[in-house]
Image (cartoon, rainbow, N blue to C red):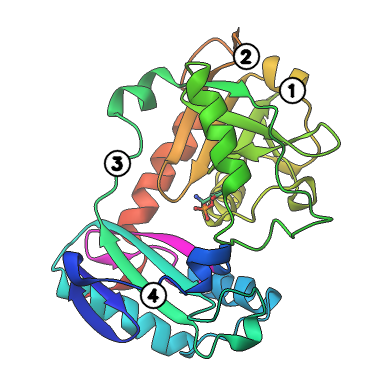
Amino acid sequence: MKIHVDGTLYEEEDAKISVFDHGLLYGDGVFEGIRFYDGRIFQLEAHIDRLFNSAHSICLRPPLTKSGMKQALLETVRANQLQSGYVRLLLTRGVGNLGLNPEHCRLPAVIIIVDYIRLYPAEIYKRGLKVVTCTTRRTTPTALSPMVKSLNYLNNILAKIEASQAGAEEGLMLNEWGYVAECTADNIFIVRNEGVVTPPVTAGALAGITRSVIFDLALDLGISLKEADITRHEVFVADECFLTGTAAEVIPVAMLDGRRIGVEVPGPITQRLTSEFHQLTRRVGTVIY
Ligand code: PMP
């Protein structure tokens, strides 16, 4: 695959950044994961807006305008001649010295990686994920806003390790008050009494782009949807539970901490939303070629 680094396309083996890049030294940067389906980039505007908002929030000024960033992304996808795949777009603080002061970083770096993605095997979309609650908490909004999709994923990674060590496929992360925030790389939804509920961003959820697409789809389908604090107990007794994310799309959860969720997996509302979501990904998006 060809990879964009600061305006130039490189072969994978030649795509390199400095060891003095603060993205590496301090996780000082922001990123997006973006999907393209059948020659169209899904939710490109929303991803670019979120990237720029994340960057603005951490005082990182992108070296490209929004339209320049979109062009760079489109050119990188075109150079790889793919119809469907995944793009990882990174903006780092750039090269500085070993001190953490970002004032020494002259120019933020832009990295665009195109790849295939398959997060979970197809059978998990049929039987549902096994999830466990992790002791590692979601980053508290009092430390770093969960609205910032930063390169600091260490607590999510620790939660993922906990989940794997417990033999589960995903880890549920609570916030500092013990309410459900999200999973390690996906937002969480429950279904009860035919309505959908998801934690608000104030509970520590990332403002997921798939999450907001689900909001729109629920509205179109006449399914009630609300943002509310959720406890583990409410997940245990939910009729259905599913996760959303750019890479995972919509994926059912079968079990949390050894408790089965609902009777049918995927449940009827999860199935409706999944099927609408798939149709939408093929219908809309920024045309690549
Ligand atoms: N939460 C976290 C922590 C994430 O990293 C992601 C993205 N993988 C999501 C939720 C889902 O967000 P999106 O739908 O925008 O991919």
Q: CA distance from mark 1 to mark 3?
A: 28 Å
Q: Is residue 284 above or below residue 200?
A: below
**Disc 1, disc 2: CB below 8 Å?**
yes
Q: Is residue 31 on the magenta stretch?
A: yes
> Looking at this view, is 84 or 276 the one in front?
84
* Label 4 within 8 A of ligand 1 by Cβ: no
What's the magenta region?
A: 30-45
Per the image, the residue denoted by label 2 is 257
In the image, what residue type sits under mark 2?
Asp
Does residue 234 appear left or right of residue 216 in this picture? Answer: right
First in sequence: mark 2 vs mark 4: 4
Q: Nearer the viewer, mark 3 or mark 4?
A: 4
What is the number of callouts on the image?
4
Per the image, the residue denoted by label 3 is 118
First in sequence: mark 3 vs mark 2: 3
Q: CA distance from mark 3 to mark 2?
A: 25 Å
Q: Is residue 175 above or below residue 52?
A: above
Per the image, the residue denoted by label 1 is 232
In the image, what residue type sits under mark 4?
Ser
Q: CA distance from mark 2 to mark 4?
A: 42 Å
Corner quadrant of residue 195: top right
* Label 1 within 8 A of ligand 1 by Cβ: no
In the image, what residue type sits under mark 1?
Arg
Magenta span dominant secondary structure:
strand
Classed neighbour count for the residue bearing mark 2: other residues with Cα under 10 Å, few (<14), some (14–19), many (≥20): some
**Can residue 26 be spotted in the picture?**
yes
Q: Is residue 135 on the magenta stretch?
A: no
